[in-house]
Image (tube, helix red, strand yellow):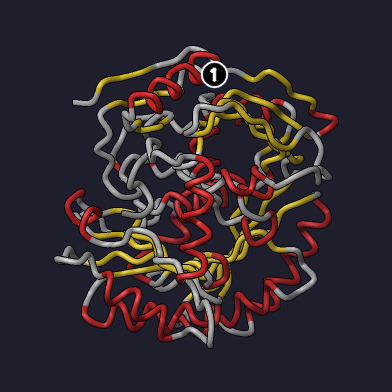
Amino acid sequence: MSELLKPGDAAQVLEAVRWAAASEKPLEVLGGGSKRGLGRPNHAGHRLDLTALSGVSLYEPEELVLTASAGTSLGEIQAMLAQQRQQLAFEPPDLADLYGGDGEQTIGGVLAANLAGSRRIKAGAARDHLLGVKGVSGRGEEFKSGGRVVKNVTGYDLCKLMAGSFGTLAAMTEVTVKVLPAPEKTRTVLAFGLADEAAVAALAQAGGSPHEVSGLAHLPAAVAARSAVSYVNGANAAVTAVRIEGPAPSVAHRTGALREQLAAVGAVEELHGSNSAALWREVGAVAGLLPDTGAVIWKVSVPPIDGPAVARRVLAEGGEGYYDWAGGLVWLALPPSDDAGADLVRGAVAAVARGGDGGHATLMRAPEAMRGAVEVFQPPIPALAALQGRIKEAFDPLGILNPGRMYP
């Protein structure tokens, strides 16, 4: 059992990291611990728990900006925003059921993992909404980057660097994020019975239309049957979903137009309010839609047109999957194996590459032994690996922060 360090403020975080650096004691940096199963196993002797760094220090709804300590629970922030009919537009997914943990997500953890949901196709990634950050590097040095406005171009954009670093560069103590108005109305148009390739083509057509869609997903029949939404689980067929959000009159007009468009390829239905919200929560949360019988879960990102080919190749001998981001994000559940299916999945991704970076695959859930034996994150090309090494050296030369969490 690792020893727990739980600083109560940024000054104590600085003190703890300086002690670790001076003693060369590795630290596991974490918030609520809801995603400890994401990444390579961490065997640091000490845990740096940042959940005591909690609270919103600034919220200006009219300026669409919020500043909070990194350990602030995501639920607290979302409740505060909901009172002002605002939201975190990148739609952070709740992966608690995927990892079977009871820890609560924190705003710092969500941004450190750069997690975004189905609205990413419209709103962008989590990193696109991170305006400012304060933290402590592995050198035991405090730093600050960004500010309270979008147009901040002074120096290097460390905010983009922190998002997706999984705590391997710094312990974030405070973040400033851009928030946006919540939609007045939400509708989801469903088309039934489409094969994967036809569904992705229909999603591409919807995404390229002038109707400003905010979600594009396809659930094969077996996956759709696990949904808690009756229109979806009762379809007895594959379900293709297109979400429309915005002012009520606009949503009504765009929904009608998309129903006409999708009716040309299959039977259609429409979800309102709570049913629509429930479906997209399921798509983001993953666990309820894919078999939870010890399956290994992969997240694959490729050009949308290549999603079905990757899924077909990976699932040829068993397993299930579904599509988000118009086919650009493929969730795959595979039977356990010695290498967690890494060669199969990464081979399928490489097969669709077109002379460059054709995509990447992340092992999202697997037993600890598997996560220690294979590359969890997509192995970077040599030039990128060298750049990552120089960045790690600049921020954490002794390798004390989340050692081995991303790469060996």
The percent position of residue 207, horizontal first and vertical second, equals: 68, 72
State the image quarter where residue 380 is shown: bottom left
Q: Quick check: can you spot residue 234? A: no
The percent position of residue 47, horizontal first and vertical second, equals: 33, 26
- Quick check: 282 above or below 268? above
In depth, the one of 372 and 143 nearer the eye is: 143
Image quadrant in which the N terminus is located: top left
* Residue at the (81%, 37%) spot, across then down: 149
Classify 10 Å Cα crowding around label 1: few (below 14), some (14-19), many (20 and above).
many
Image quadrant in which the C terminus is located: bottom left
Tell how many labels: 1
State the image quarter where residue 42 is shown: top left
- Quick check: 377 above or below 14? below
State the image quarter where residue 181 is shown: top right
* Residue at the (29%, 26%) spot, across then down: 46
Q: Quick check: can you spot residue 355? A: yes
In depth, the one of 287 and 135 nearer the eye is: 135
Residue at image mark 1? 54
In depth, the one of 36 and 222 nearer the eye is: 36
- Quick check: 266 above or below 270? below
In depth, the one of 240 and 399 nearer the eye is: 399
Left or right of residue 335: residue 229: right
- Quick check: 205 above or below 240? below
Left or right of residue 155: residue 136: left
The percent position of residue 271, horizontal first and vertical second, equals: 59, 56
Query: Please, what is the three-letter code of the amino acid marked with disc 1?
Result: Ser
Farthest-out residue, left? 338
Left or right of residue 312: residue 219: right
Dot 1: what SS? Answer: loop
* Residue at the (58%, 72%) spot, across then down: 268
